[in-house]
Amino acid sequence: MLEDAKMLTFARTALKNLFSRPATVGYPYEPAKFPQRMRGHIEIQTENCIRCGLCMRSCPPGAIRVDKAAGTWTINRFDCIQCGSCAGACPKKCLSLVPGYTEPDYQKKEEVFYLPEKAPAAKPAQTAAKPAETAVSP
Amino acid sequence: MAKRSIIPFGPQHPVLPEPVHLDLVLEDETVVGAIPSIGYIHRGLEKLVEKKDFKQYVYVAERVCGICSCGHGMGYCEAVEQVMEIEVPARARYLRTIWMEMSRVHSHLLWLGLLADAMGFESLFMESWRLREKILDMFDATTGGRIIFSVNCVGGTLKDMDRDMLAGICRAADEIEQEIHPVMETFLRDYSVQSRLKGLGVLKKDDAVLLGAVGPMLRASGEAYDVRMLGYEAYGDLDVEPVTAQDGDCYSRCRVRLYEILQSLRLIRQAAEKIPDGEIAVPVKGNPKGEYFARIEQPRGEAIYYVKGNGTKNLDRFRLRTPTTSNIPPMVELLKGCQLADVPLIILTIDPCISCTER
Ligand code: SF4
Ligand code: SF4
């Protein structure tokens, strides 16, 4: 039944692998390389946001909350599934998916971004784009 | 007659990547009956169509399964597109086909690794998964995800591939084709592998058809049936020939999957060559009203997507019949008469995906 069977067919490959460089990256000692398109996490440019709330409505797991009155844009990164639906829905293109994973944590935290006043003031963009506060979700 | 005893098998078992439970009826070491039960990972994803709008649901559909995610998103989109009578641009159809074939390669390589692992052939297992990494890296570069791609949308695709990416995919396909040779040689010719797989769990052609086997399971029994022959997406423009084997045993199922990898690599190159320029998506207006059954060939076999829309943004019903659902009856049949020690291997060769099955 096993007429054309051979012995030790894999020995060469196994030996070659034993003496060649590892196929894996030695993370965390070596940095992980992310491709440009990687859907890592959502970033917002708060200065362009018009508080329309379309991102909130398009998000399948409901990870985003836009509070028009308080002027905040909140994301629960632990609920986010990196689908990119919000980035596609945003009329001002202020959301983008950028490479790099978010950090693990032992609690589900929300990240709150304060949106600038409606008439955009001449604020430096960098400080506005930083997360202003992290709050623990209930 | 020997005394009968019942041995519970699973839901946790070293060879099972996913939970399925079987009550094995044994006479000494021989299995005379098997009663399967599932229900350990039901997530109620079909019900979610009532909560999420039909465009958002694409992201839910592709999360039904980690391995067939591209196909689930695509099958769902295709069903909705047919209901809404949307003509998908040619480029998007080709892109979907390329990603779908890449999925097949990575699914089969994953399965080959699991099979090697089930036989205790660890170096072969690692080598299969090393090859799979090349495809995953290409997925990462082209879609932004290694397992969940989020590239399908109703009306086309969300991402395009430029010339460099297509060339990169073809390069990866060439590399895999070269490097898979020792792996194929081992799976097909090695004495230990053959003595483990040959003649084990034989499914005759008539039984396979009668019991509704699909995919590589059906083709390994000699029935040349492949849903890709229907020519959905871009398959109509490519040469798809079902890969078949005659014996219907575990060895044949392994053989069919190995040759399907080569076939998929060929299809990827063909599609990358023929892909036309143009739009990747058309705008979608309105809501679906009506119903449609879409069929596609997933790596594990034929999957059916049923969609019923009522003219609102939420669908009335979405139903997904996965390949494993159809392959469970033949699997139960195969188990009758085998030895207890062969049960894990036979279950593995149907490539069960229980998460998909339970949704
Ligand atoms: S990427 Fe998807 S899940 Fe994450 S916030 Fe945007 S829409 Fe929500
Ligand atoms: S969709 Fe864009 S502009 Fe509208 S609230 Fe969200 S981030 Fe702001």
Image: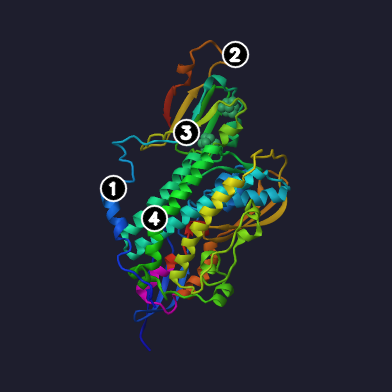
Residue B231 vertical position relative to residue B331 in the rendered view, above or below: above
State the separation of the CA atoms marked 4 and 3. 27 Å
- Depth check: give the residue in front, B328 or B104: B104
Residue A69 vertical position relative to residue B61 in the rendered view, above or below: above
Ligand 2 found in image quarter? top right
Q: Which range is magenta?
A: B335-346
Tag 2: residue type?
Ala
* Residue B41 visible to the viewer: no
Q: In terms of sequence position, does the residue under pointer 3 or pointer 2 come before the other?
A: 3
Q: Secondary structure at mark 2?
A: loop
For label 4, the crowd category at 10 Å Cα-Cα, with few meaning under 14, some 14 to 19 and many 20 or more, is many
State the separation of the CA atoms marked 3 and 2. 34 Å
Which mark's residue is nearer the viewer, 4 or 2?
4
Instruction: Determine if the magenta segment contains residue B339.
Output: yes
Residue identifier under label 4? B128
- The answer to the question of whether label 1 and label 3 lie on touching residues, with beta carbons closer than 8 A, is no
Position of residue B7 in the picture relative to residue B233 (left or right): left
- The answer to the question of whether label 1 and label 2 lie on touching residues, with beta carbons closer than 8 A, is no
Q: Residue at x 52, y 48 (%)?
A: B63
Q: Which label was assigned to residue A119?
A: 2
Q: In terms of sequence position, does the residue under pointer 1 or pointer 2 come before the other?
A: 1
Which mark's residue is nearer the viewer, 1 or 3?
1
Tag 1: residue type?
Ser
Quick check: do tags 1 and 3 share a chain? yes
Q: Position of residue B121 (x, y in %)?
A: 32, 62
